[in-house]
Image (spheres, helix red, strand yellow):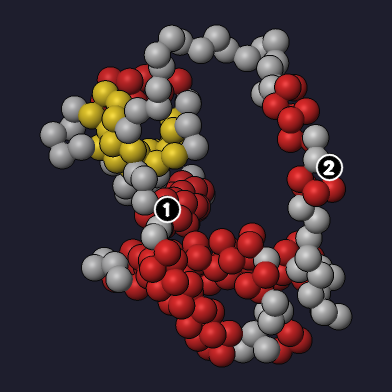
Amino acid sequence: MTADEQVAEWKALVEWVVWIHDLYELSREERLPLCWPQHPGLVEEFRSLKAWRNAIYNSPDAAAAAHTARSWHGELRQTIAAITSFWAPTCRAGHKDATVLSEAHPDLAERWQRVGPPLMNSSPTAEPGAAISDEISDQDMTTALKAGHAQPHSRSMPYYTRLDGTWWTRSTDGTTWLRCTDPAHHAQLDDTSARMRAADTARDQLDHQ
């Protein structure tokens, strides 16, 4: 971002946090420390929560947004609960800056660079030029489903499938599958899949009684 964009973004974030602070009564038990702007990790948490919430409530699909909104509220509670134990554990008695790695251990980052990434003997050999694609063929997805590497969303929504830790949706012509890249959509699919698969299981149990 440019300097002007950073100023505008920060102003919008502060206004949003003030609104969230009052709306969710975060003054109770000092759930939100007033020094939150001095914790970069917490700032990033709020930036992502703000972007996620905007995506939810600006969604044209009200039914889908309702489920995602519940997921968002759960994430908000987890973030607030983590403040005193993770983000700002020593700030109730006054803000305390975290240690900067380069100051506490000037040569540590260089040592990490020399070590390099961990390599396991069981690691598969990378294919030359291989890259993560946002599209795979229907045949490859069918093979992954049969092998158990992929899992359908539910019986009611087989056109969504989870593979390699991400969600995929079948293209309109049925020849390819496209990766779902929107975080809010991902959260919605995670939530609805758990619910609908549980419903499928319950229905199967009733059918066998």
Q: Which mark is residue 93?
A: none
Residue plotted at (69% across, 22% down): 116
Tag 1: Cα neighbours inside 10 Å, few (<14), some, or many (≥20)? few
Q: Nearer the viewer, residue 198 or 204?
A: 198
Question: Which one is closest to the eye, mark 2 or mark 1?
Answer: 2
Query: Which picture quadrant has residue 77?
Result: bottom right
The image quadrant that residue 27 belongs to is bottom right
The front one of 205 and 127 is: 127
From the top left corner, tell me how far across and down residue 53 is, in percent.
42, 70
Q: Is residue 125 above or below residue 75?
A: above
Which of the 4 quarters of the picture holds residue 51?
A: bottom left
* Label 1 secondary element: helix
Residue 67 visible in image? no
Q: Report the residue at 36% width, 51% height from top.
A: 182
Q: Horizontal and vertical percent for residue 103?
A: 80, 49
Please name the amino acid that badge 2 sits on: His
| Relative side of 113 to 91, left or right | left
The residue drawn where x is 28% and y is 36% is 178
Badge 1 amino acid: Pro
Q: Is residue 60 above or below residue 196?
A: below
Q: Please tell me which residue lies in front, 163 or 90.
A: 90
How far, Cα to Cα, is label 2 from label 1?
A: 36 Å
* Place of residue 34 in the rendered image (x, y in percent of width and height, measured from the top left): 69, 82
The N terminus is located in which quarter? bottom left
At horizontal 76% and vertical 53% (from top left) the residue drawn is 100
Residue 30, given in percent of the width and then of the height, sits at 74, 85
Mark 2 and mark 1 lie on one chain; the one further toward the N terminus is 2
For mark 2, give the secondary structure.
Answer: loop
Q: Are marks 2 and 1 in contact (CB under 8 Å)?
A: no
Label 2, on which residue? 105
**Location of mark 1 (residue):** 183
Q: Is residue 65 visible?
A: yes
